[in-house]
Amino acid sequence: MDTAQLKKVYKETIAPALQKQFNYSSSMQVPVLKKIVINQGLGDATQDKKIVDVAINEISAITGQKAVATYSKKDIANFKLRKKMPIGVMVTLRGERMYEFLEKLIRVSLPRIRDFKGIATRLDGRGNYTLGITEQIIFPEINIDEIDRIQGMNITFVTSAQTDEEGYALLKAFGLPFKNAKND
């Protein structure tokens, strides 16, 4: 696969448009997408250790980068949880892989969601956005016949934007299919 087209589109059209829209004096003020973090919480992993291995393989296949297990920080008896037990999987994408994943997410995976009407427009107050996905089977790398359990995941888009408005404009320009709740 060639280098992601979105990076080229960002440099040639998105960045100049955002600079004009927000009246930035320098091109260095234009918000950029810093990283994408994919996180999957696995509460059932306390009973079955294989769940973490399967999740690592799935997330690694989806992103093209090796995922790592996340571990609990303390003991919680009610959840049968011990300190340093694997309870999740995460991967952080930057650079070319980040743009390739974003392009695949927008063009291939999100349109595969049943009854898809767009994603919520709620950012975190600092221009970052987290998208919750309920099924990992929307990604083409996952073979549905080999899945023994449906797992969800959170995909966080970390931007250099100072405000939600700037972050929203950046992500919308990349092509994230937001619901039309904000003024477009």
Image (cartoon, rainbow, N blue to C red):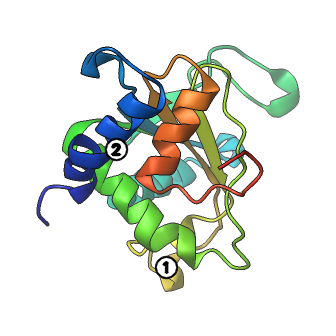
**Residue at image coords 64%, 68%:** 149
Q: Nearer the viewer, residue 170 or 101?
A: 170
Mark 2 residue crowding within 10 angstroms, few (<14) / some (14–19) / many (20+) = many
**Residue at image coords 71%, 46%:** 183
**Quarter that holds the N terminus:** bottom left
Please name the amino acid that badge 1 sits on: Glu
Q: Quadrant of residue 129?
A: top right
The residue singled out by tag 1 in the image is 146
Above or below: residue 102 compared with residue 129? below
Q: Nearer the viewer, residue 102 or 15?
A: 15
Name the element at disc 1: helix
Above or below: residue 57 compared with residue 168? below
Q: Farthest residue to the bottom: give it.
A: 145
Residue 65 seen from this side: no
Residue 127 seen from this side: yes
Q: Earlier in the sequence, mark 2 or mark 1?
A: 2
Q: Is 3 on the left or on the right of 130, as rendered?
A: left
The circle drawn on residue 90 is none
Q: Farthest residue to the right: give it.
A: 78
Please name the amino acid that badge 2 sits on: Ile
Above or below: residue 143 compared with residue 121? below
The circle drawn on residue 14 is 2
**Residue at image coords 42%, 38%:** 36
Give residue 124's position: percent from left, percent from top.
67, 26
Mark 1 residue crowding within 10 angstroms, few (<14) / some (14–19) / many (20+) = few
Disc number lying in front (2 or 1) = 2
